[in-house]
Image: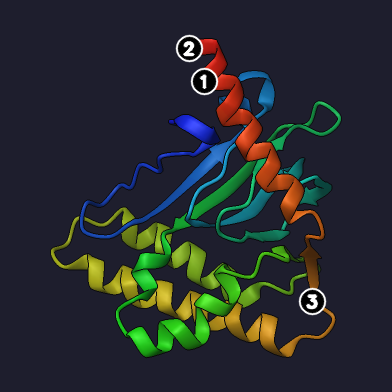
Amino acid sequence: MYIIENNLEVVEYENLLLPISIKIRELIQYKNKRALCHWHDDIEIIKILSGSMNFYINGEIFRLIKDDILIVNSKQIHYGYEYNHDDCKFICLMVNPSVLKINKAMYQEYVIPIIENNGLLAWCLKNNEGKQLDRILFALIDWQEKSCRAKEWRLLSLVYDLWYQIYNLIDNDKNLNLIKDDTSDDVNIFKQMVIFIKIIKKQ
């Protein structure tokens, strides 16, 4: 992870033509099985393949187990860390919202209301609720590893399929496990404190 001022992560994309990143990771790859606290513009999707972990998002802490899918909204402070000394293997997909801007009207209608909703931290799919997302995540991994020319079009089509599924899950499922934020002002204060502390240390 490459963290700069204000705990902002600079996401490193595998493909220069398309700002998405998808990797299979393990908590053991991180120091003390804990990622650094960070945020970014990207929407982040975590799919647990084995083991378990705790996940912090803007003051909320909850546990992810095998087959859970967590979708972290844009600009949320978050990090994953071990639970009960367990290791965890997971898919991590990062999608920059700019990928969804090809049609401006559709972006305004179907993307902005979600990524700019300060009260919506994340949404979590359990008990095989995310089967459609599973299919897309594994297809993205498969296509990311291919060396064929113009594969970016296939990756892009999969990302749009992903957003279609996510949007409809949020729009239609009244029982969806949404994690809402009532402390957005506190989070903004935290970000400013981080900036202030770093400025003081430089003096």
Q: Residue at x 50, y 78 (%)?
A: 111
The CA distance from mark 3 to mark 1 is: 41 Å
- Which numbered circle lies on residue 202? 2
Q: Secondary structure at mark 3?
A: loop
**Which residue type does callout 3 highlight?**
Leu
The image quadrant of residue 193 is top right
Q: Could you say which quadrant of the image residue 171 lies in?
A: bottom right
Residue receiving disc 3: 176
Q: Nearer the viewer, residue 52 or 194?
A: 194
Which residue is under mark 1? 199
Q: Is residue 138 above or below residue 163?
A: above
Using residue 45 as the reference point, say whether residue 94 is left or right of it: left
For disc 2, the neighbor class at 10 Å (few under 14, some 14 to 19, many from 20) is few
Q: Position of residue 192 (x, y in %)?
A: 61, 37
Q: Name the amino acid, label 1.
A: Ile
Q: Pointer 3: residues within 10 angstroms few (<14), some, or many (20+)?
A: some
**Distance between mark 3 and mark 2 Cα atoms:** 45 Å
Compared across the picture, whether 11 is left or right of 189 comes to left
Residue at the (66%, 47%) spot, across then down = 188
The reply to whether discs 1 and 2 touch (Cβ–Cβ < 8 Å) is yes
Residue occupying the far left of the picture: 149
- Please identify, in this view, whether the residue under mark 3 or under mark 1 is nearer the observer: 1
- Of badges 3 and 2, the one in the foreground is 2
Does residue 106 appear to the left or right of 47 in the view shown?
A: left
Q: Report the disc number at residue 162.
A: none
Tell me which residue sits at (73%, 52%) in the image.
185
